[in-house]
Image: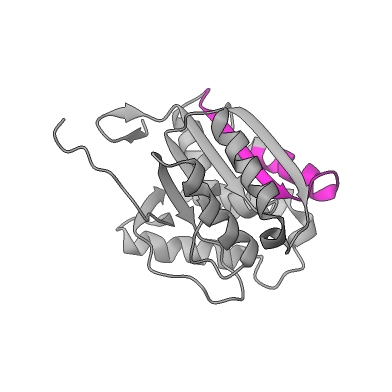
Amino acid sequence: MIRLGAGRPVERVVAVGAHCDDVAIGAGGTLLTVCRARPGVRVDALVLTGGGGEREQEERAALAAFCPDADLRLTVLKLPDGRLPAYWDEAKAAVEELRAGTEPDVVLAPRTADAHQDHRGLARLVPTAFRDHLVLGYEIVKWDADLGRPTAYQPLTAEIAEEKVRLLQEHYPSQRHRPWYDREAFLGLARIRGIECQARYAEAFDVTKLTLDLGE
């Protein structure tokens, strides 16, 4: 069973991404792990760009596969890809609306140190709405060379790691042309993060603020 803090089980998860596929790339293995351990867990997902077209269709099919047996509630907006800093008010309103509808145990969001302006902007918005929550900043491998030194890890079984890669290849055909979008990249990073936390595979996250409860 997946637990947080003083024996508290995960009942609600929030997952946010700037683009369709961000959540799956950064935290797909974690979602698979949580959803398989906690059937019926509620997952509220928000993606700021890609709505109304092929990308939204890919995202809906993908997150349904990454969140098996979950109560998945996905919103995909139509903000312009690559221009989120210019649409700060709209992005902030979307994050705040998401927050008003859920009280999550954990929030999966981009890292604040991500080099992509859309990822970075969303990462900075999330803590302004989810002020008293555990926010895990996921990483996305890409050409920017912005991978850092993570502070939290979710170990993945070999089965989960392989399933994540398979689902990424299956559900996002629009991304297969990208030179970094392949099995070696995704599984290789998971292997490195696994080494760092003494597991076979893992996903890694940045945690900028964490409140401990060591008295229970």
The vertical placement of 18 against 99, above or below, is below
- Residue at 52%, 56% (x, y): give it: 124
x%, y% of residue 82? 73, 64
As drawn, the residue found furthest toward the front would be: 89
As drawn, the residue found furthest toward the right would be: 53
Question: Magenta segment: does it hold 54?
Answer: yes
The vertical placement of 203 against 94, above or below, is below
For the residue pair 125 and 81, the one nearer the viewer reads as 125
Left or right relative to 210: residue 101: right
- Residue at 73%, 42% (x, y): give it: 76
Task: Please identify the quarter of the rendering in which residue 151 is found.
Answer: bottom left
Question: Magenta segment: does it hold 131?
Answer: no
x%, y% of residue 25? 59, 55
- Residue at 16%, 30% (x, y): give it: 216
The vertical placement of 17 against 142, above or below, is above
For the residue pair 115 and 143, the one nearer the viewer reads as 115
- Residue at 24%, 31% (x, y): give it: 6
The vertical placement of 13 against 203, above or below, is above
* Residue 10 in sight: yes
Looking at the rendered structure, the number of numbered marks drawn on it comes to: 0
- Which quadrant of the figure contains the N terminus? top left
x%, y% of residue 30? 48, 45
For the residue pair 149 and 155, the one nearer the viewer reads as 149
Image colouring = one colour
As drawn, the residue found furthest toward the left would be: 215
* Residue 159 in sight: no
x%, y% of residue 40? 53, 22
As drawn, the residue found furthest toward the top would be: 40
Task: Please identify the quarter of the rendering in which residue 100 is found.
Answer: top right
Q: What residue range appears in magenta?
A: 40-63
Left or right relative to 69: residue 181: right
